[in-house]
Amino acid sequence: MTERYGFHRARQRMVEQQLCKHGIKDQRVLQAMRDIPRHQFVSAAMAAHAYQDSALPIGEGQTISQPYMVARMCELLNLRGNERVLEIGTGCGYHTAILAQLCARVYSIERIQSLYSLAKGHLRAIGQGNVLLKCADGLDGWTGFAPFDAIVVTAGGALSSTWLRQLQSGGVLLMPEGQQRDHRLVQHRMENGKVRKSQHDLCSFVPLRKGVQ
Protein backbone atom coordinates (compact mmCIF):
# COMPACT_ATOMS: atom_id res chain seq x y z
CA MET A 1 0.00 0.00 0.00
CA THR A 2 1.30 3.47 -0.91
CA GLU A 3 2.19 5.55 2.12
CA ARG A 4 0.01 8.55 2.81
CA TYR A 5 1.77 11.69 1.54
CA GLY A 6 1.14 13.50 4.82
CA PHE A 7 3.15 10.95 6.76
CA HIS A 8 6.00 11.14 4.24
CA ARG A 9 6.16 14.94 4.51
CA ALA A 10 5.94 14.80 8.31
CA ARG A 11 8.88 12.39 8.40
CA GLN A 12 10.99 14.65 6.20
CA ARG A 13 10.19 17.62 8.47
CA MET A 14 11.10 15.51 11.50
CA VAL A 15 14.55 14.84 10.04
CA GLU A 16 15.16 18.44 9.02
CA GLN A 17 13.76 20.22 12.09
CA GLN A 18 14.36 17.78 14.95
CA LEU A 19 17.52 16.02 13.86
CA CYS A 20 19.60 18.13 11.47
CA LYS A 21 18.93 21.38 13.33
CA HIS A 22 19.88 19.78 16.62
CA GLY A 23 23.24 18.43 15.52
CA ILE A 24 22.69 14.95 14.06
CA LYS A 25 25.24 14.73 11.24
CA ASP A 26 25.64 11.04 10.39
CA GLN A 27 24.10 10.78 6.92
CA ARG A 28 23.38 7.07 7.24
CA VAL A 29 21.42 7.70 10.43
CA LEU A 30 19.50 10.57 8.85
CA GLN A 31 18.61 8.42 5.84
CA ALA A 32 17.41 5.58 8.08
CA MET A 33 15.20 8.03 9.96
CA ARG A 34 13.80 9.23 6.61
CA ASP A 35 13.12 5.67 5.45
CA ILE A 36 11.50 3.98 8.45
CA PRO A 37 7.79 4.87 8.95
CA ARG A 38 7.53 5.69 12.66
CA HIS A 39 3.74 5.94 12.45
CA GLN A 40 3.58 2.20 11.74
CA PHE A 41 5.14 1.44 15.13
CA VAL A 42 2.48 3.18 17.24
CA SER A 43 -1.25 2.63 17.65
CA ALA A 44 -3.72 4.13 15.18
CA ALA A 45 -4.74 6.60 17.90
CA MET A 46 -1.13 7.81 18.17
CA ALA A 47 -0.26 7.82 14.46
CA ALA A 48 -1.03 11.51 14.00
CA HIS A 49 1.57 12.29 16.69
CA ALA A 50 4.23 9.90 15.37
CA TYR A 51 6.55 12.59 14.00
CA GLN A 52 6.40 14.96 16.93
CA ASP A 53 9.50 15.58 19.03
CA SER A 54 8.37 13.38 21.91
CA ALA A 55 8.22 9.87 23.29
CA LEU A 56 4.85 8.14 22.88
CA PRO A 57 3.13 5.35 24.85
CA ILE A 58 3.15 1.86 23.35
CA GLY A 59 1.44 -0.02 26.19
CA GLU A 60 2.62 -1.88 29.30
CA GLY A 61 3.94 1.39 30.74
CA GLN A 62 6.59 1.58 27.99
CA THR A 63 7.30 4.21 25.33
CA ILE A 64 8.72 4.65 21.86
CA SER A 65 11.66 7.01 22.29
CA GLN A 66 11.78 10.59 21.04
CA PRO A 67 13.09 10.62 17.41
CA TYR A 68 16.11 12.75 18.34
CA MET A 69 17.16 10.27 21.04
CA VAL A 70 16.91 7.30 18.67
CA ALA A 71 19.04 9.15 16.12
CA ARG A 72 21.55 10.32 18.71
CA MET A 73 22.03 6.83 20.14
CA CYS A 74 22.51 5.39 16.66
CA GLU A 75 25.01 8.13 15.80
CA LEU A 76 27.04 7.42 18.95
CA LEU A 77 27.30 3.75 17.95
CA ASN A 78 29.07 4.88 14.76
CA LEU A 79 27.89 1.87 12.74
CA ARG A 80 29.33 1.30 9.28
CA GLY A 81 27.16 -1.54 7.97
CA ASN A 82 28.91 -4.82 8.73
CA GLU A 83 28.28 -5.01 12.49
CA ARG A 84 26.30 -7.43 14.61
CA VAL A 85 24.34 -5.44 17.19
CA LEU A 86 22.60 -6.56 20.38
CA GLU A 87 19.66 -4.43 21.48
CA ILE A 88 18.32 -4.74 25.03
CA GLY A 89 14.69 -3.62 25.01
CA THR A 90 12.91 -4.09 21.67
CA GLY A 91 9.80 -2.17 22.71
CA CYS A 92 7.60 -1.65 19.65
CA GLY A 93 10.51 -2.36 17.28
CA TYR A 94 11.12 1.16 15.93
CA HIS A 95 14.66 1.59 17.26
CA THR A 96 15.32 -1.99 16.13
CA ALA A 97 14.28 -1.10 12.58
CA ILE A 98 16.54 1.96 12.49
CA LEU A 99 19.48 -0.11 13.72
CA ALA A 100 18.74 -2.75 11.09
CA GLN A 101 19.23 -0.10 8.38
CA LEU A 102 22.69 0.65 9.74
CA CYS A 103 24.26 -2.76 10.43
CA ALA A 104 24.36 -6.33 9.12
CA ARG A 105 22.25 -7.98 11.84
CA VAL A 106 20.31 -6.95 14.94
CA TYR A 107 19.66 -9.33 17.83
CA SER A 108 16.99 -7.79 20.03
CA ILE A 109 15.61 -8.89 23.40
CA GLU A 110 12.28 -7.83 24.90
CA ARG A 111 11.18 -8.95 28.38
CA ILE A 112 7.45 -8.22 27.94
CA GLN A 113 5.70 -10.87 25.87
CA SER A 114 2.99 -8.58 24.47
CA LEU A 115 5.59 -6.06 23.25
CA TYR A 116 7.73 -8.83 21.78
CA SER A 117 4.71 -9.95 19.72
CA LEU A 118 3.89 -6.35 18.78
CA ALA A 119 7.43 -5.65 17.58
CA LYS A 120 7.55 -8.89 15.63
CA GLY A 121 4.40 -7.86 13.76
CA HIS A 122 5.66 -4.35 13.08
CA LEU A 123 9.00 -5.53 11.70
CA ARG A 124 7.32 -8.14 9.54
CA ALA A 125 4.91 -5.52 8.19
CA ILE A 126 7.74 -3.31 6.89
CA GLY A 127 9.73 -6.28 5.58
CA GLN A 128 12.71 -5.92 7.90
CA GLY A 129 14.53 -9.23 7.53
CA ASN A 130 17.92 -8.83 9.22
CA VAL A 131 16.52 -8.90 12.77
CA LEU A 132 16.28 -11.78 15.24
CA LEU A 133 14.03 -11.26 18.27
CA LYS A 134 13.47 -13.18 21.48
CA CYS A 135 11.43 -12.70 24.64
CA ALA A 136 13.81 -13.06 27.58
CA ASP A 137 15.53 -11.21 30.41
CA GLY A 138 17.77 -8.65 28.70
CA LEU A 139 20.11 -8.53 31.69
CA ASP A 140 21.40 -11.94 30.58
CA GLY A 141 22.32 -10.71 27.13
CA TRP A 142 22.39 -13.31 24.34
CA THR A 143 25.30 -15.68 24.83
CA GLY A 144 24.47 -17.83 21.80
CA PHE A 145 25.40 -15.04 19.38
CA ALA A 146 28.07 -13.21 21.38
CA PRO A 147 30.40 -11.45 21.02
CA PHE A 148 28.72 -8.41 19.48
CA ASP A 149 30.28 -5.43 17.74
CA ALA A 150 27.87 -3.11 19.53
CA ILE A 151 25.32 -3.33 22.34
CA VAL A 152 22.62 -0.72 22.89
CA VAL A 153 20.33 -0.61 25.93
CA THR A 154 17.04 1.27 25.60
CA ALA A 155 16.09 1.43 29.29
CA GLY A 156 17.73 3.40 32.08
CA GLY A 157 19.68 1.91 34.96
CA ALA A 158 23.06 0.41 35.80
CA LEU A 159 25.58 -1.25 33.51
CA SER A 160 25.68 -5.06 33.62
CA SER A 161 29.09 -6.76 33.53
CA THR A 162 27.37 -9.59 31.62
CA TRP A 163 26.93 -7.28 28.65
CA LEU A 164 30.57 -6.23 28.72
CA ARG A 165 31.60 -9.89 28.58
CA GLN A 166 29.53 -10.23 25.40
CA LEU A 167 31.16 -7.25 23.71
CA GLN A 168 33.75 -7.73 20.98
CA SER A 169 37.18 -6.16 21.41
CA GLY A 170 36.90 -2.72 19.85
CA GLY A 171 33.14 -2.79 20.34
CA VAL A 172 30.87 -0.17 21.88
CA LEU A 173 28.16 -0.47 24.53
CA LEU A 174 25.78 2.47 24.86
CA MET A 175 23.11 2.94 27.49
CA PRO A 176 21.29 5.55 29.60
CA GLU A 177 22.78 5.26 33.10
CA GLY A 178 21.34 6.70 36.27
CA GLN A 179 18.45 6.42 38.72
CA GLN A 180 14.71 7.00 38.51
CA ARG A 181 14.26 8.89 35.23
CA ASP A 182 17.44 10.99 35.49
CA HIS A 183 19.89 9.43 33.05
CA ARG A 184 22.88 10.25 30.92
CA LEU A 185 23.95 8.43 27.78
CA VAL A 186 27.22 6.64 28.56
CA GLN A 187 29.40 5.02 25.92
CA HIS A 188 31.69 2.13 26.92
CA ARG A 189 34.35 1.14 24.39
CA MET A 190 36.21 -2.15 24.86
CA GLU A 191 39.89 -1.73 24.00
CA ASN A 192 42.49 -4.44 24.72
CA GLY A 193 40.43 -5.87 27.54
CA LYS A 194 39.87 -2.48 29.16
CA VAL A 195 36.77 -0.29 29.06
CA ARG A 196 37.02 3.35 28.06
CA LYS A 197 34.03 5.37 29.20
CA SER A 198 32.62 8.65 27.87
CA GLN A 199 29.50 10.56 28.90
CA HIS A 200 27.08 12.28 26.57
CA ASP A 201 23.50 13.62 26.58
CA LEU A 202 21.23 13.95 29.59
CA CYS A 203 18.04 11.98 28.98
CA SER A 204 15.09 10.19 30.58
CA PHE A 205 14.17 6.56 29.93
CA VAL A 206 11.82 3.96 31.37
CA PRO A 207 13.63 1.89 34.02
CA LEU A 208 15.59 -1.25 33.24
CA ARG A 209 13.94 -4.27 34.87
CA LYS A 210 14.87 -7.92 35.27
CA GLY A 211 12.80 -11.00 34.56
CA VAL A 212 10.18 -11.79 31.93
CA GLN A 213 6.61 -10.54 32.00
Image (cartoon, helix red, strand yellow):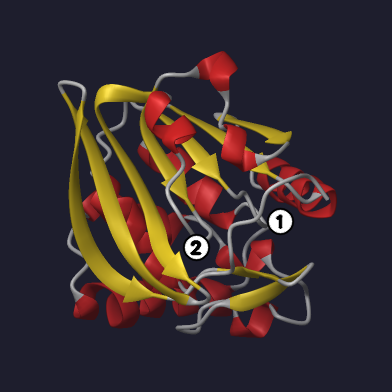
SS for callout 1: loop
Kindly identify which residue carries mark 1. 1
Q: Amino acid at mark 2?
A: Gly
Which residue appears farthest toward the top when viewing the image?
Answer: 144
* Residue 156 image label: 2
Residue 158: quarter of image: bottom left
Across and down, in percent, residue 32 comes to 39, 52
Q: Nearer the viewer, residue 21 or 179?
A: 179
For the N terminus, the image quarter is: bottom right
Tell me the crowding category of disc 1: few under 14, some 14 to 19, or many 20 or more residues within 10 angstroms, Cα based: few
Q: Amino acid at mark 1?
A: Met
**Left or right: 56, with 20 as reference point:** right
Give the residue drawn at x 52%, y 69%. 65
Q: Is residue 191 above or below residue 115?
A: above
Tell me the crowding category of disc 2: few under 14, some 14 to 19, or many 20 or more residues within 10 angstroms, Cα based: many
**Left or right: 141, with 136 as reference point:** left
